[in-house]
Image (cartoon, rainbow, N blue to C red):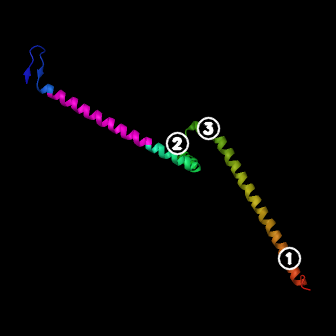
Amino acid sequence: MVANSETGTATGDGAARGGRAAEAYRAARERTYSAYETARERAAGVTRQATDQIAVYPVGAVIGGLAVGALLGFLLPATRREAQLLAPTGRKVTGAAREAAQRGLDAGKQQIEEIRNRATQKVGEAVVEAVSGGGKD
């Protein structure tokens, strides 16, 4: 180590340490920039692929988006404020869904009953026609 009489600082080891630190800083900066560029290129590629897939399968994208949204909504805890604000709406939606399901069941039962009545009538007519000889003269 050599003493510098004008500034009162030591040269030699200090300069070497400063050079190594600068080199380490430069290398870290280059690695960081390289990693950033790689990540940016990959993100751009993924974005392009997603855009292409959405263009080809728009319904799948909507369904996927709804599924992701539902999953996130399920995983995130509800706050008291959300419960207070959404509880009446939830009850209304649940009630409307139950009513719609019941109307669907009732309509289905009615259609089944109509089909059963028509089938019974047709079978009865066929039996009467078969017993009476039904046009075999």
**Residue at x 16%, y 29% (from the top left corner):** 17
Q: Amino acid at mark 2?
A: Pro
Q: CA distance from mark 2 to mark 1?
A: 62 Å
Q: Amino acid at mark 1?
A: Gly
| Residue segment shown in magenta | 16-44
What kind of element bears circle 3? helix
Q: Which mark is residue 124?
A: 1
Q: CA distance from mark 1 to mark 3?
A: 61 Å
**Residue at x 70%, y 48% (from the top left corner):** 95
Q: Position of residue 4 (x, y in %)?
A: 9, 17
Q: Position of residue 111 (x, y in %)?
A: 78, 63
What kind of element bears circle 2? loop
* 121 left or right of 82 in image: right
Residue annotated with mark 3: 84
Q: Position of residue 71 (x, y in %)?
A: 53, 47
Query: Looking at the image, is mark 2 or mark 1 nearer the viewer?
Result: 1
Residue annotated with mark 2: 77
Sequence-first tag of 3 and 2: 2
Q: Badge 2, how many Cα within 10 Å: few under 14, some, many 20+?
A: few
